[in-house]
Image (spheres, grey):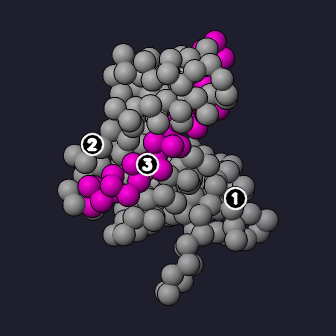
């Protein structure tokens, strides 16, 4: 499977980008937001690739960062949310907005993307909210600001998931000082789940 392409942009046509890698031109579909990173013809391109196999052929989808590709993969797991809708969500709303909308259960925000109706938006939230919540927590825990204390990291992760600051601080205190940040976040979520 192709996981990454680094080469030169030969041409772009809408969301289809052709990248020359060692004399071979790969056609890659990218979200609108990635077109800015790809640049003009002749520019260098470095994309994370997801190769999708269908009955009618194989299609390559390109992303500027691994996180975008991971979110695309999660969206593809939802029934009725194919690659075209995944690209629309990432391209029109952006990775952070989609993640925040799912974590915050904001179906109206998701429905702003082309091809996403209210029912599909609700299904995306229902099927992905727990997975997104876990990813948000782990990202915040591992990619936190250097000056933040472990307590701050736990509280901020819980607030990002929609808890009020006083609830988040209380749960962080109940989780105790032992363990890694990830373990303390999970413990705090267990405390909040019992309320």
Instruction: First in sequence, mark 1 or 2: give its number.
Output: 1
Question: Quick check: marks 1 and 2 in contact, CB under 8 Å?
Answer: no
Instruction: Name the residue located 30 percent from the left edge and 43 percent from the top edge.
Output: 105
Furthest-front residue in this view? 194
Q: Residue 130: give x, y in percent of width and height.
A: 43, 48
Instruction: First in sequence, mark 3 or 1: give its number.
Output: 1
Q: Residue 129: give x, y in percent of width and height.
A: 39, 48
Instruction: Name the residue located 47 percent from the left edge and 36 percent from the top edge.
Output: 190
Q: CA distance from mark 1 to mark 2?
A: 32 Å
Q: Check the image and report above or below for 119 versus 101.
A: below
**Which of the 4 image quadrants contains residue 104?**
top left
Q: CA distance from mark 2 to mark 3?
A: 14 Å
Is disc 3 placed on a helix, strand or loop?
helix
Provide the residue designation for mark 3: 130
Q: Check the image and report above or below for 98 versus 3.
A: above
Part of the protein shown in magenta: 120-148
Residue 169 is covered by the magenta coloring:
no
The numbered disc on residue 4 is: 1
Q: Main secondary structure of the magenta part?
A: helix
Question: Quick check: marks 2 and 3 in contact, CB under 8 Å?
Answer: no
Compared across the picture, whether 120 is left or right of 142 comes to left
Q: CA distance from mark 3 to mark 1?
A: 28 Å
Is disc 1 placed on a helix, strand or loop?
strand
Screen quadrant of the N terminus:
bottom right
Question: Quick check: marks 3 and 1 in contact, CB under 8 Å?
Answer: no
Compared across the picture, whether 192 is left or right of 181 comes to left
Instruction: Name the residue located 43 percent from the left edge and 18 percent from the top edge.
Output: 170
Provide the residue designation for mark 2: 106
């Amino acid at each position: 499977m192709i996981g990454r392409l680094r080469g030169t942009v030969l041409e772009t046509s809408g969301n289809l980008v052709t990248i020359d890698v060692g004399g071979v031109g790969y056609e890659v579909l990218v979200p609108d937001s990635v077109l800015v990173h790809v640049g003009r013809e002749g520019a260098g391109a470095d994309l994370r690739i997801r190769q999708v196999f269908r009955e009618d052929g194989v299609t390559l989808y390109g992303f500027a960062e691994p996180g975008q590709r991971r979110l695309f993969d999660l969206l593809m797991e939802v029934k009725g949310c194919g690659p075209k809708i995944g690209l629309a969500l990432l391209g029109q709303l952006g990775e952070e907005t989609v993640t925040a909308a799912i974590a915050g259960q904001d179906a109206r925000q998701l429905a702003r993307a082309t091809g996403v109706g209210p029912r599909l938006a609700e299904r995306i939230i229902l099927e992905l909210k727990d997975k997104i919540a876990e990813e948000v927590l782990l990202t915040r825990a591992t990619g936190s600001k250097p000056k933040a204390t472990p307590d701050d990291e736990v509280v901020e992760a819980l607030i990002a998931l929609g808890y009020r600051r006083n609830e988040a601080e209380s749960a962080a205190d109940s989780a105790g000082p032992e363990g890694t940040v990830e373990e303390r976040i999970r413990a705090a979520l267990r405390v909040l789940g019992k309320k």
